[in-house]
Image (spheres, grey):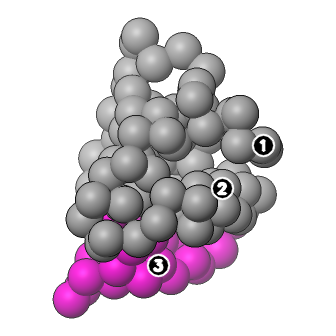
Amino acid sequence: MTMHYLATACPIRSEHVTWKALEGESVLLNLETGVYFSLNETGTVAWELFDGATSLATVGDALCIRFNVPAEQVQQDLLELAQALLKEGLVKIREDSSTPSGTDRS
C-alpha cells in the first residue's frame, strides 16, 4: 500500500472477526485462524470506521482531528495498521465504496 492508496482504499472488517472494546482499547479475534490482535485507542477509533464505505484518507482525517496529531504521522501509522490487519485477515479492502456491506460488532 502507498500513500496514493489512501484516496480510494476503503477497509471493511472481515465477517470472520469478533471484537471487544474495553476502556478505549480493543481485542480482535479472527475466528477462522485464531489470530488475536490488540488495538490502542487510536487503532480502535480507526477500526470502528473501517466500514467499507469510508476511505483510509477520511479515517486519517478523523484521527487527526480527534487526537490532534499531524497528518503525516497519522497517514504512515494508518497505512501500517491497515497492512497488518490485512495480512492477518482481519480486514478486506474495497476499492468501490458505493455498495458497502457492514459487519456487526460482537
Tag 3: amino acid: Leu
Whether residue 55 sits left or right of residue 7 in the image: it is left
Q: Secondary structure at mark 2?
A: helix
Task: Please say whether residue 44 is one of the residues in the magenta stretch.
Answer: yes
Q: Are marks 2 and 1 in contact (CB under 8 Å)?
A: yes
Q: Residue at x 59, y 60 (%)?
A: 72
Q: Amino acid at mark 2?
A: Leu
Q: Residues within 10 Å of mark 2 (few under 14, many from 20)?
A: some
Please tell me whether mark 1 or mark 3 is closer to you in this view: 1
* Image spot of residue 90 (x, y percent): 59, 56
Give the CA distance from mark 3 to mark 2. Answer: 14 Å
Labels 1 and 3: the sequence-earlier one: 1
Q: Indicate whether residue 49 is drawn in magenta.
A: no
Q: Position of residue 19 (x, y in %)?
A: 37, 68
Q: Which residues are magenta?
A: 18-45
Q: Is residue 5 above or below residue 17?
A: above
Residue at horizontal 54%, vertical 15%?
Answer: 96
Residue where numbered disc 1 is placed: 2
Can you identify the residue that label 2 sits on? Answer: 79
Question: Which quarter of the rendered picture does the C terminus lie within?
Answer: bottom left
Q: Is residue 31 in view?
A: no
On-image quarter of the N terminus: top right
Secondary structure at numbered mark 3: strand
User: Is disc 1 surrounded by few (<14), some (14 to 19) or many (20+) residues within 10 Å?
Assistant: few
Which residue position is annotated with label 3?
39
**Real-space Cα separation, disc 2 to disc 1, in angstroms:** 8 Å
